[in-house]
Amino acid sequence: MTADFARLPNGGVLPLVQLPRLGLERFRAAVLDEIAKSGARLSAFFACPGDARGHLLIAVLALDDQGVLAVTSCAVEREYAALTPDCPQAQGFEREIAEVWGIRPLGHPWLKPLRFQPPRGAPAAAERPAIGLAPFFAISGAEIHELAVGPVHAGVIEPGHFRFQCHGETVYHLETSLGYQHRGVERALLGGPAARTIHYMETLSGDTSIGHATAYSRICEALGRIRVPARGQALRGVAQELERLANHIGDLGALAGDVGFLPTMSYCGRIRGDALNLTAILCGNRFGRGLVRPGGCGCDITAGDVERLLSRLEEVRRDTASAVQLLFESPTARARFDDTGALSAQTCRELGLVGVAARACGLARDVRRDFPYGIFQFAQLPVCTWESGDVFARAYVRWMEIQQSLIFVSEQLAALPDGEIRRVPTDGTLAPERLAIALVEGWRGEICHAAITGADGRFACYKLVDPSFHNWFGLAFAMRGQQISDFPICNKSFNLSYCGHDL
Amino acid sequence: MSVWNFSYAALGLLLAPLLPGIVNRTKAVFAGRHGQPLLQTYYDLAKLLRKGAVYSRTTSWVFRLAPAGGLACVIAALLLVPAGDYAAPLAFPGDLILLAYLLGLMRFMTVCAALDTGSSFEGMGASREVQFSALTEPALILGLAALAYATGSFSLSGIFGGVTRPDWLQVGPALVLVAAALLIVFLAENSRIPVDDPNTHLELTMIHEVMILDYSGPDLAFILYGASLKLWLLGALLANIFLPLSGRSGPLQIACLVAGIFVVAVVTGVIESVMARLSLLKVPQLLVGAAAMSVLGFVLMLRYAL
């Protein structure tokens, strides 16, 4: 059993020679067994070019209760027996592997393109597959009707296509078809780190700049054997919680807006801006661009900045509390949130959901507690969960996390360590032939970055998993049997990233 | 028949686009915003009338007829509404039935036009509109019937001219029930919260707005203007019940009623500010509740009216 997996901590590095290489059948059995027995999650599952015999499939399992990552691999040529029939959380990963590398997961129940990207290794001029053109799951019957929404939506949001199978106002099935935001980021990262790499990270999903930049920086630090100074770690933690704060506040306002509850919508819209402005005090950019850098932070703050941050944080706390109280005390708003779009903990576990969506189903999954990193090794945040799994639960978990983040940021700012903020190694090279994995709890949930370096110490493979990648399927399940007019609030309660999924 | 009989309808044609502005300004105040100008609807109408219209190739004459037809219906209905003692220009016994069916005809045309586009969104909106209006109509008709019984008149002009202060003393509770029912009818017919959300951009949740998604230019102007007039028309019915002005001077009555309609618009803004929209599953309960209040009001009138 132990020989089937290499175990490493969050932010750990594994020499490639120590990566277990199992046979196809043993690989499949070991991964399924670990997921079934110890409740492990599939954090990442991807292929990378191996030796002459074909590709290497790598599975990264997160063992939440032990706080370790289990990694294993197997060589594969053209096809293998899909994990999805026995392990639904693998469905997106296997579709991606099939699309990018042409490796067929045999027995995958719905093997259609995920992002409509050209296969890896295709010439640069190759035509991209026609996006969105693929069979959709359909239900037939006299009173069944199909509804297509998007990719162009009303309002300023990202493009994505939703296909509903409805019976009257009731949704039987929702299929999401994304890929409109595909930019080829993973391909662009090969051969890095380069001057552009950090900017790709900060714009992977614009609202998660800090989260993704932190994960990437931790990969570089692990491979470059850099220890980040205490002040840099604390500032990163503050920035990450400010990001969570701003997005959660914005989400609560948007949820209120979708049920037509105006006061909270207007107030939270403004307070979200105030919270973003706090990040601007840290680094001059409202979305935290330029703040997190490999080795520490890109900019420092003065004692005066800390004073300003603390006093404005107090204003944010006061305003948010009154605006959110209005929302949760309004019977008409509560009536819309309660029992809408409920997911069971069982479904949530099987789909491998992460972040707010999982915690709202009562699953205490939080990278900050389970795989503590950076400042979170020293300052613990309680994991906020709620049992009901519905829109209310996702809204309420957000509110609880807002309160925890406010406390955390105040405490960290009040006791900010002195010293330097960044340590850059003199040679700046990464260890060759290594696998490094970093998990970060972004505001949506677990962000997983996995990098493999070649003999030259450059990225031979870089795998990005945004929490949205896990959670889009959760939204489809939450909509089953719901009123179609409740789709907007269900969608908003997950608030997933399109570009974080499409990469 | 004097100039006052027409003044009210004329004021309606002129001032109705002010009502959405008042509603929006009220909502803005509650939300701590400045809000759009009071006269925004006038600006919108002026802009839209100058524009050309775009028509989908899948639509037919039905689609083009609906905006003008709907506007004609609501203007005709406006001519049935009295102002205090002044009978409406088109008053006749039974005109309350005509009022209900003019509104019904307007809706029929909008629904047909929505179905004409062949869009699945608009089909869904049409289905919701028809379902909910079937539940709204009993509340409206029964409410008017209760008032007709109380005042002994089958004309809107007789009914609203006849609601006097003694009536409020005699059958006040019944009048309150009928007024509450008509308020819900007012909100439902005008696609306001809690039944519909006029501000949403989410096509999956809309009722009225989704049916007019394909309109542009002057057609959209007609629809917007028609919606303002409908707001005015139903607001006038409510104001007429609450303001027993019989016997006062003409200008005073008219001024009080216009002020009353503005108050109804403010009340609408307050309602929209303090509550969320109902789930579509709960809307029928609200509408049936309105019908029940009308019935109860009617029964009370039968027992206690003079």
Image (cartoon, coloured by chain):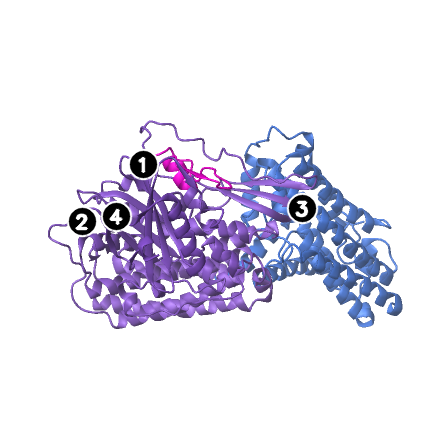
Q: Which amino acid does the dot numbered 1 rest on?
A: Gly
Q: CA distance from mark 1 to mark 2?
A: 26 Å
Q: Chain of mark 3?
A: A
Q: Which mark is residue A198?
A: 4
Towards the viewer: A69 or A276: A69
Prevalent SS, magenta region? loop
Residue linked to disc 1: A54
User: What residue is drawn where x is 43% and y is 65%?
Assistant: A364
**Which one is in front in this view, the residue at disc 1 or the one at disc 2?**
1
Tag 2 or tag 1, which sits nearer the N-term? 1
Q: Chain of mark 1?
A: A
* A132, above or below A331, in the image: above
- Range of the magenta residues? A95-120
Horizontal relation, residue A329 to residue A157: left or right: right
Residue linked to disc 3: A168
* A307, above or below A205, in the image: below
Q: Residues within 10 Å of mark 1 (few under 14, many from 20)?
A: some
Q: Which mark is residue A430?
A: 2
Tag 1 or tag 3, which sits nearer the N-term? 1
Q: Are marks 1 and 4 in contact (CB under 8 Å)?
A: no
- Which image quarter: residue A270? bottom left
Q: Chain of mark 2?
A: A
Whole-percent x and y of residue B183? Answer: 70, 60
